[in-house]
Amino acid sequence: MPNLSYNITKRERDCLVALIESLDGNFPTRLVTLSRKMNIKPPTLLEIVRRLGEKGLVLNRSGMLMPTESGLELYTEIVEAHRVLECMSVLANHSSSQACSEASHYDYIMEHETVHALWNLLGKPQKCPHGKKIEVDKL
Ligand SMILES: [Zn+2]
Ligand SMILES: [Zn+2]
């Protein structure tokens, strides 16, 4: 399980997620495009990307960004944790957008086993509050 061993920060998590979600098929994303999308200045984003690179999660080839295999694996773990945590958050009568932002604060530090146990406890929900598929049992 890739979680935790990478020990990423919230900003690195946001960058990895935004990068992967802005990929157009197998084409890399430009640093400038991602910086605009994330509303972060290019030099700041470059520093985050450098750290993600050191952790073996993102490749930067002259400003063209691609996730590595490990980056994609970690992303999948984050997304599954995110959706399960959103399901938990709506139990507290949070709106789906509140649930989304709450979940993003700890989806990247949860261990897979804990997410799986929580998913069981919640009655194995098949979708997050936004209707996105949960496949935590397939990881
Ligand atoms: Zn969300
Ligand atoms: Zn969702």
Image: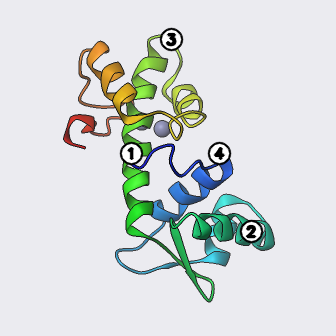
Q: What element does badge 4 sit on?
A: helix
How far across and how far down the image is residue 38, in percent? 66, 59
Foreground tag (2 vs 3): 2
The residue wearing badge 1 is 77
- Which residue carries the number 4 mark? 10
Q: Amino acid at mark 4?
A: Lys
Q: Are marks 1 and 2 in contact (CB under 8 Å)?
A: no
The quadrant in which residue 112 appears is: top left
For residue 47, which quarter of the picture?
Answer: bottom right
Helix, strand or loop for disc 3: loop
Task: Tell whether circle 4 marks a residue whose Cβ is less than 8 angstroms from ligand 1.
Answer: no
Under mark 2, the amino acid is Glu
Cα gap from disc 2 to disc 3, whole angstroms: 38 Å
The quadrant of the picture showing ligand 2 is top left
The answer for how far apart the CA atoms under marks 1 and 2 are is 24 Å
* Badge 2 element: helix
Question: In the image, residue 130 lies at what x, y percent?
Answer: 39, 34
On the picture, is 1 further left or further right than 20?
Answer: left
Q: Which residue is mark 3?
A: 93
Write the residue at 67% across / 71% down.
50
Which amino acid type is shown beneath numbered disc 3?
Asn
